[in-house]
Each structure stands twice: as structure tokens, then as C-alpha cells.
Amino acid sequence: QLQLQESGPGLVEPSETLSLTCTVSGGSITTHTFYWGWIRQPPGKGLEWLGYIYYNGNTYYNPSLKSRVTISADTSQSQFSLKLTSVTAADTAVYYCARRPYDIRMPLTWGQGSLVTVSS
Amino acid sequence: QSVLTQPPSVSGAPGQRVTISCTGSSSDIGAGYHVHWYQQLPGTAPKVIIYANSIRPSGVPDRFSGSKSGTSASLAITGLQVEDEADYYCQSHDNSLSGSVFGGGTKVTVL
């Protein structure tokens, strides 16, 4: 059964870079049938899509964050990662990694989420 | 501001029927992309309760149903139960973003 697990620092200082890794078990990130990405949820607020990476390395980012977001993959470790630069308090959120099927008739599969707080 | 529009809250007494709307545009729901619905309990990740507009995953009670028409979709909960108190989000795909879009979420309260 597929499992997604986020990991990374829970506290990041303002203006620094937020880095998170998602480890995938029970499935391959090299298959063409899925995209792998990140979604965040500020405390008490709604969900925001950040971006996806496809098995061929193509990336797709939310235009509102595109200049600050990078998603990459390490297929040897079955992991993909998020980097968000120049963070502010507004970037405080639970960050979820997720799998999006190529067939968009199917829903997302989510990790459990990782709270990242931006504060000095 | 979310791409898809949902009412912030709906409420109903136990046993009643409530509906949650999700309104999009010609680049997402109106472009023919499917709508998925997620239930989120406090402190947990979203859980899919309806996918591909109207399909209920195994284990989801049949009091949950979904529909889609034009640029909008709806989630209905019939026979509302206390355990249905949660936040509900709709999700679709946007061809101009090449990514996922979400509604702002609706809090369901059982009176």
C-alpha cells in the first residue's frame, strides 16, 4: 500500500529556505502514471497547490509562488523534495506531499502532513 | 483567495440533508475536468469521499453523494450525522495552471 511521509525542520527563520522531503513507499516515483507534488494549508485556512514533478523531471508550479518554489526528485531514494526560498510568516503551514494520478479522474493521495513554522 | 468557490459554512440537524456547492470556471470544472471531494477532520490529512464527480470510494457511507453540471459541482450529505462534522474541500484541475485547484473549504456543523 502506498505511503507518503514528509520530513524536515519544523521551524525555519524568516528569509531562509524551507526544505522538505517526501519519502514514498509501496510505489515507484519513476512511473509515468503519476505526478508527485506539494500542497500546503496555513493554520485555520484552506488548501493551496504548490507544484508537481513528473517522472521525466518536468515541473509545474503555482504561478503565485513560482519564483520561490523548486521541486526535485531523487529516484534512487524514492524521494522528492520541496524548497521554498525567502520565507515569511505567511509561509507557516502544514505541508502535505501528494500523488496525483496522470488520469485526473482519480483523486489525490496524501501524506500525513508536516507543520512548518516560520519564526525567529 | 481560492480558485474554486465554496460556502464557508453549512449546518443542519441530525438526519437532515445539506449540500455544499463548488463553483469554478471555464478553465477548470467548466473545461470538463472531474471534481473530487475531501473530508478533513481536525489535525488530519484530507480524505477522499467522492471522486470523479460522483463516485464513492469503498467504505464511504452512501449518505454522501456528488454531482456536477457546467462550471459547478455539489456534495450532498443526507441523513446528517454528528460524525459528519468536518471541513469539506472540492478539488479539480486547471488547464491554464497545469495544476490542481481547490475550494476554500466548507465547515459542516451538526446542530
Image: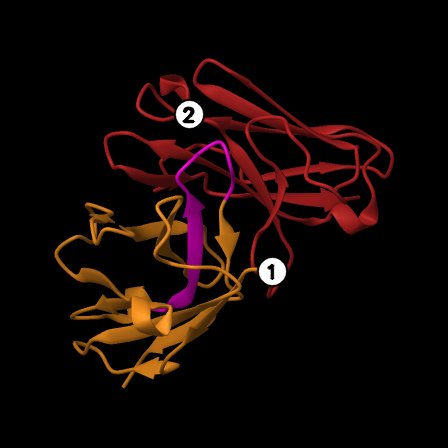
In the image: residue A5, left or right of residue B13: left
User: Would you call the spot at circle 2 few (<14 residues within 10 Å), some (14-19), or many (20 or more)?
Assistant: many
User: Which chain comes out orange in the rendered image?
Assistant: A
Spot occupied by residue B50 in the image (x, y as percentages of width and height): 62, 35
Would residue B20 be found to the left or right of residue B30 on screen?
Answer: right
Q: Nearer the viewer, residue B85 or A51?
A: A51
Tell me where the magenta segment starts and ends, as one range: A92-107
Is label 2 in contact with label 1 (beta carbons under 8 Å)?
no
Extreme residue toward the bottom, this view: A120
The residue depicted at 23 percent of the width and 68 percent of the height is A83
Residue identified by numbered label 1:
A1
Residue pushed farthest left? A67
Q: CA distance from mark 2 to mark 1?
A: 27 Å
In the image, what residue occupies the spot 45% across and 38% down? B103
> Which of the chains bears the disc numbered 2?
B
Amino acid residing under circle 1: Gln
Report the front residue among B90 and B52: B52
Circle 2 residue: B33
The picture places residue A82, in percent across and down from the top left corner, at 28, 66
SS assignment at label 2: loop
Q: Residue at x 51, y 52 (%)?
A: A109
In the picture, residue A42 is in which quadrant?
Answer: bottom left
What residue is drawn where x is 84% and y is 33%? B79
> Does the magenta segment cover residue A94?
yes
For the N terminus of chain A, the image quarter is: bottom right
- Indicate whether residue B54 is drawn in magenta: no
* Residue A36 at x, y percent in the picture: 36, 54
Residue type marked 2: Tyr
The color chain B is rendered in? red
